């Protein structure tokens, strides 16, 4: 994490800059493609770490005939925040979804390579996918609370996984999760109110509380702030930093400022290749690959 960047407050116009970035990304898709054409896209940097939570080797992902991820190898460090960045369509979300088998629900998706969580094969046919997703939770781009009460949103996972024997235990899990998600003080007097009635930022924190209520080891976040205003974004970023001591976090983001503020390591993807990975500070201050430099200096979306 870059302390200089972390210490900086979010500027009021940053969200606007972010949305310009997103809309510009569509216009510059071909520019990004052209940028990679004919270049060596093999990985530079430090893909492996001393204490990996995930060890991912030679991963390919296809949607039908189309290859979205090309021979990607990296480790995700335990209790670190790893950011995936890169131009639109480069495969960040596809790769993230491999980590808890969310791509299983896409019939055309085919994954090969070695994907291990704590040394065990994520894609072992004998693996219980429900148990995997309890260990590797996910927070999506758009806050998606269930149309239930705030309490029931958080209690849902612990109930189905049988984590509480008594109501008092469930109450405790709900309170602890809402506290960890920084939402308890705002909702403690209205736990019976519907989760969908909260503000966007509160809904996203509720989704984070729901994800952590089952005591996952990993939380995957796919652009968790893209639907939020700058203040709600700042709250989520603070939360990510707080949670990183307890959980392994992998975040896909279009905001390079966000990656720089919240992550320990950053992986830059381009046209399905992992082009560069390393300590966030190094990737942003002295990128090793020309494409990384072009991307972080805004030469394409
Ligand atoms: N369900 C799907 N079926 C077919 N192709 C898909 C599917 N999901 C993604 N793709 C394709 O795979 C490639 C990688 O997409 P992916 O969404 O992973 O990229 P991304 O880097 O997360 O993009 P963005 O930043 O725009 O969200 C793209 O070409 C996309 O069109």
Image (spheres, rainbow, N blue to C red):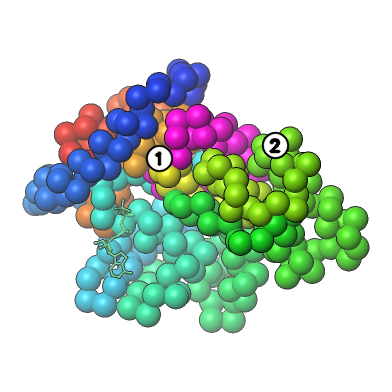
Q: Which residues are magenta?
A: 228-253
215 on left or right of 173: left
- The image's mark for residue 266 is 1
- The image's mark for residue 69 is none
43 on left or right of 82: left
Q: Is residue 248 magenta?
A: yes
Would residue 107 be seen by someone viewing this image from the given angle? yes
- Which residue is found at the position 36% from the left and 37% from the top? 255
Please tell me whether residue 160 is drawn above or below residue 209 in the rendered image. below
Please tell me whether residue 100 is drawn above or below residue 89 in the rendered image. below
Residue to which mark 2 is pinned: 186
Residue 239: x, y in percent?
A: 60, 36
- Which residue is found at the position 41% from the left and 43% from the top? 226
Which one is earlier in the sequence, the residue at label 2 or at label 1? Answer: 2
Please tell me whether residue 25 is drawn above or below residue 160 in the rendered image. above
Q: Nearer the viewer, residue 294 or 89?
A: 89
């Amino acid at each position: 994490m870059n302390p200089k960047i972390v210490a900086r407050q979010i500027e009021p116009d940053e969200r606007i800059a972010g949305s310009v970035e997103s809309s510009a990304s569509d216009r510059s898709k071909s520019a990004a493609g052209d940028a990679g054409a004919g270049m060596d896209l093999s990985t530079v940097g430090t893909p492996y770490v001393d204490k990996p939570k995930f060890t991912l080797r030679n991963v390919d992902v296809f949607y039908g005939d189309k290859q979205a991820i090309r021979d990607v190898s990296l480790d995700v460090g335990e209790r670190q925040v790893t950011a995936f960045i890169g131009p639109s369509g480069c495969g960040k979300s596809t790769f993230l979804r491999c980590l808890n088998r969310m791509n299983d629900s896409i019939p055309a998706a085919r994954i090969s390579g070695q994907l291990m969580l704590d040394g065990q094969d994520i894609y072992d046919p004998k693996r219980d996918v429900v148990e995997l997703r309890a260990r590797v939770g996910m927070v999506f781009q758009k806050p998606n609370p269930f149309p239930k009460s705030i309490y029931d949103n958080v209690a849902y996972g612990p109930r189905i996984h049988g984590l509480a024997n008594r109501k008092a235990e469930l109450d405790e899990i709900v309170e602890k999760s809402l506290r960890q998600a920084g939402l308890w003080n705002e909702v403690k007097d209205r736990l019976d109110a519907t989760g969908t009635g909260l503000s966007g930022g509160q809904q996203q924190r509720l989704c984070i509380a729901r994800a952590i209520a089952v005591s996952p080891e990993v939380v995957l976040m796919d652009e968790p702030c893209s639907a939020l205003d700058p203040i709600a974004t700042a709250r989520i970023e603070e939360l990510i930093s707080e949670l990183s001591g307890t959980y392994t976090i992998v975040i896909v983001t279009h905001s390079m400022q966000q990656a720089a503020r919240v992550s320990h390591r950053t992986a830059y993807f381009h046209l399905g290749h992992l082009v560069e990975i390393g300590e966030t500070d190094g990737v942003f201050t002295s990128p090793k690959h020309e494409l990384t430099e072009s991307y972080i200096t805004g030469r394409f979306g």
